[in-house]
Each structure stands twice: as structure tokens, then as C-alpha cells.
Image: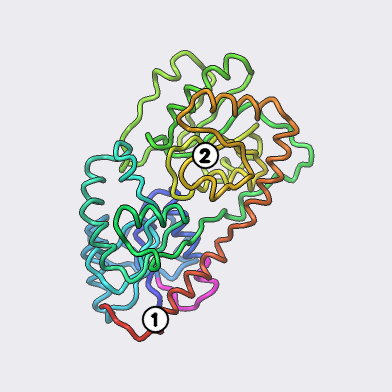
């Protein structure tokens, strides 16, 4: 049996949880031995009919993951555990661990003190006790090696992808809305302050608004953008929206803006491209690896460069059409199914090697 750490099923959906859910969904299609061990309080009850979920009684959060989950596994004989989010039982040795990025090391101000404290204690032990590590980009692979000295030969890159529901509209001649779109948790390393500063000058010259989707997670520090939007009514913070609404927003936006300083991967630009939306993006971290030549890049530290990219994409219809086409080609490089198949092979290698680190 392949047991998956299902703590993610009790957490609000961000990129990390989406990775875990989609990989689990695809693993179910390529294997017949997948069991998800989850705490009480699974948010999406419909997943009980889709996944083979076994509820492990106990507490919740880190306590469940560190105490209740490994206790349940030991009662089962200490089988291999697959962890698809960024944490895992620190002292359970027969496991494959996923660590998405080290943003908390590069940009500690983005995170709460409690989060930094927990990760500071947990991650080094977790990595030491893992049999193999998964991460989401070559960039993150280098970063994890640089910060923790984890051997690169024991790290496999498993790319994110986009759900099939994110697609272009059926309409042939869609009339774009009059807005730019940004999607992310508005935390410091996401650089929304730089984007808002750049948009201020753009909004004075062009009839365009900026819609921002996302909600700050409890693990992040709160950001105050009130001064940056005090002189404009063209910025709308929409909070979290459902996928249907999000897809419509992608489909109708003039362009998608991704100003982040740091990303281990970055799913939203691919979602935008899947929906036919042209993208302008930061040239930092993993973005050149993920987006290649399918976007207009800008230096996230240069407000004027962000403004220039916004103006270029707003005013050039031909460029938008070209980037929409390139984006469509770029998205085809990524597949949840292919990523799950790669993980399945890694699992098989460890299940068949006769080793036991229980």
C-alpha cells in the first residue's frame, strides 16, 4: 500500500494544497494501492467518494502530523509514507518528503514568528529523516541544497501543472475586460506593494483597473496596502473566489500580472495561460524556468520596469495575441498525470529495494 499524508485535506486551498490534491488524484489513476490518512475535519467532503480516505483519530495540525499520524503508521507495520506538502512527521524515517521552497529563509518577513519557529525546528530534522525529497523546480532543488546541504542526487523535481477546468473560452472573438488581474496571497515576497506602486502611474494614463484575488494565510504576516490605494478607486481586492469565477476572470482579463520576488514554482501564471490570458511576470527565482519565453519579464525591484510592462501589454494588441499563443504552448509542458507517474516510479523504487528505515 502507498500511504499519503492527508493533512492537506483539512487546510484551505493554496498552491501547496492544490499540488497535493492533484497529485493524489492522478496517483489514484495510475495505482490501485493509494490510501490517504487524514485527520478529522476534511473540508471537501466530496473527496471521500473520490479518494480512499482513512480518518486517523486524534488532534489536529502539527500535533496530528507529528504524533497521531506516525503512531497510526507504526500500528500498520511502518509502511512507506508519501508527504506532498512542505512538512512531514519529523522522526518517521520510512518516508518520501516534499518541500516546495525555502521562501521562509529568503523572505522571513513574509511569515509569522510562530511559522518561522516551527519550520526552523521541524524542517532540518524532517529532511535528515527522509529517504528521498521531492520539490517543484530545479530552482528550488538548488535552494534546498544551498540552505540545508541536502544531497541533490536525493532530490527529484516534480513540476506543478494546471487543472483541465482552466481553459480558454469557447467564444472566438472574446471582448476583453478593462482590467489587469493578479492572483496570489498578498504577502511581502509576492511584491504586491511594487505592483500597486507601478499601477498607480499606469492608472492615471489609461482606463484600466486592477483586480487582485487572494487571501493572506494565517502563517503569513499581514501586509498593509492602504497608503498605496488611498488615491485610487481602480484597485479591487476580491479575496478568495471559486474556480469558476477565477477562470472567468482569467479569460476576460487584459493581462495577468505576476510581480513576485520569490516562487518555488508559481501556478497562477500557468492557470492564466491555460485560459488564454497573456502574462507579464517577474524575472526572479523560478519564473524563467517555468515560463521560458512565453511572457514579458520585468525586474520586480524596478517599479518603472513593472509600469512599462503593464503599458506595453495594455497598448499592444498584437503582442497580447502572441503571448496568448506562446502561453498556450508553454502550459503543454506540464501535466499532473506525468508528474504523478514520475512519483509513482520513485515510490516503486523505494518499495521494491528491500530497504527498511522504519
- Where 232 falls versus 15 (above or below)? above
Considering only order in the chain, which callout, 1 or 2, is on the residue closer to the N terminus? Answer: 2
Q: Is residue 145 left or right of residue 290?
A: left
* Label 1, residues with CA under 10 Å away: few <14, some 14-19, many ≥20: some
Q: Is residue 278 left or right of residue 74?
A: right
User: Residue placed farthest to the right in the image?
Assistant: 172
- In the picture, the quarter occupied by the N terminus is bottom left
Residue visible at 37% across and 65% down? Answer: 133
Residue 95 is situated, as x and y percent measured from the top left of the image, at 33, 71
Q: Is residue 217 left or right of residue 61?
A: right
Q: Which residue is mark 2?
A: 283
Front residue of 345 and 207? 345
Q: Which residue is mark 1?
A: 351
Q: Is residue 144 left or right of residue 31?
A: left
State the extent of the magenta-drawn residues as a range: 26-35
Front residue of 147 and 348? 147
Front residue of 23 and 153? 153
Instruction: Tell me if residue 332 is in the magenta stretch.
Output: no
**Residue 250, numbered label:** none
Residue visible at 68% across and 40% down? Answer: 323
Q: How many marks?
A: 2
Amino acid at each position: 500500500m502507498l500511504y499519503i499524508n492527508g493533512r492537506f485535506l483539512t487546510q484551505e486551498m493554496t498552491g501547496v494544497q492544490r499540488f497535493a490534491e492533484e497529485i493524489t488524484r492522478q496517483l489514484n489513476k495510475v495505482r490501485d494501492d493509494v490510501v490517504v490518512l487524514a485527520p478529522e475535519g476534511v473540508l471537501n467532503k466530496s473527496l471521500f467518494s473520490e479518494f480512499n480516505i482513512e480518518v486517523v483519530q486524534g488532534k489536529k495540525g502539527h500535533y496530528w502530523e507529528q504524533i497521531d499520524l506516525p503512531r497510526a503508521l507504526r500500528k500498520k507495520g511502518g509502511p512507506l509514507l508519501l508527504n506532498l506538502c512542505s512538512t512531514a512527521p519529523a522522526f518517521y524515517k520510512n518516508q518520501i518528503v516534499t518541500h516546495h521552497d525555502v521562501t521562509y529563509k529568503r523572505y522571513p518577513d513574509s511569515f509569522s514568528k510562530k511559522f518561522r519557529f516551527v519550520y526552523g525546528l521541524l524542517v532540518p530534522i524532517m529532511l535528515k529523516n527522509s529517504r528521498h525529497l521531492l520539490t517543484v523546480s530545479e530552482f528550488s532543488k538548488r535552494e534546498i541544497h544551498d540552505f540545508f546541504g541536502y544531497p541533490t542526487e536525493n532530490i527529484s523535481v516534480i513540476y506543478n501543472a494546471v487543472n483541465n477546468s482552466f481553459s480558454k473560452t469557447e467564444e472566438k472573438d472574446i471582448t476583453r475586460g478593462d482590467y489587469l488581474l493578479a492572483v496570489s496571497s498578498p504577502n511581502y515576497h509576492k511584491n504586491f506593494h511594487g505592483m500597486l506602486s507601478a499601477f498607480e502611474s499606469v492608472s492615471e494614463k489609461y482606463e484600466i483597473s486592477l483586480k487582485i484575488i487572494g487571501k493572506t494565510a494565517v502563517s503569513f504576516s499581514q501586509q498593509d496596502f492602504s497608503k498605496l490605494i488611498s488615491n485610487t478607486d481602480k484597485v479591487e481586492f476580491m479575496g478568495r473566489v471559486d474556480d469558476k469565477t477565477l477562470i472567468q476572470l482569467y479569460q476576460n482579463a487584459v493581462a495577468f500580472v505576476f510581480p513576485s520576488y520569490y516562487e518555488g514554482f508559481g501556478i497562477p501564471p500557468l492557470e492564466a495561460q491555460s485560459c488564454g490570458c497573456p502574462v507579464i511576470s517577474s524575472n526572479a527565482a523560478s519564473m524563467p524556468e517555468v515560463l521560458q519565453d512565453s511572457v514579458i519579464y520585468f525586474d520586480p525591484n524596478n517599479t518603472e520596469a513593472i509600469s512599462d510592462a503593464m503599458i506595453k501589454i495594455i497598448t499592444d494588441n498584437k503582442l497580447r495575441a502572441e503571448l496568448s499563443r506562446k502561453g498556450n504552448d508553454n502550459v503543454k509542458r506540464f501535466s499532473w498525470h506525468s508528474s504523478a507517474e514520475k512519483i509513482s516510479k520513485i515510490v516503486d523504487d523505494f518499495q521494491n529495494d528491500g530497504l527498511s528505515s522504519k
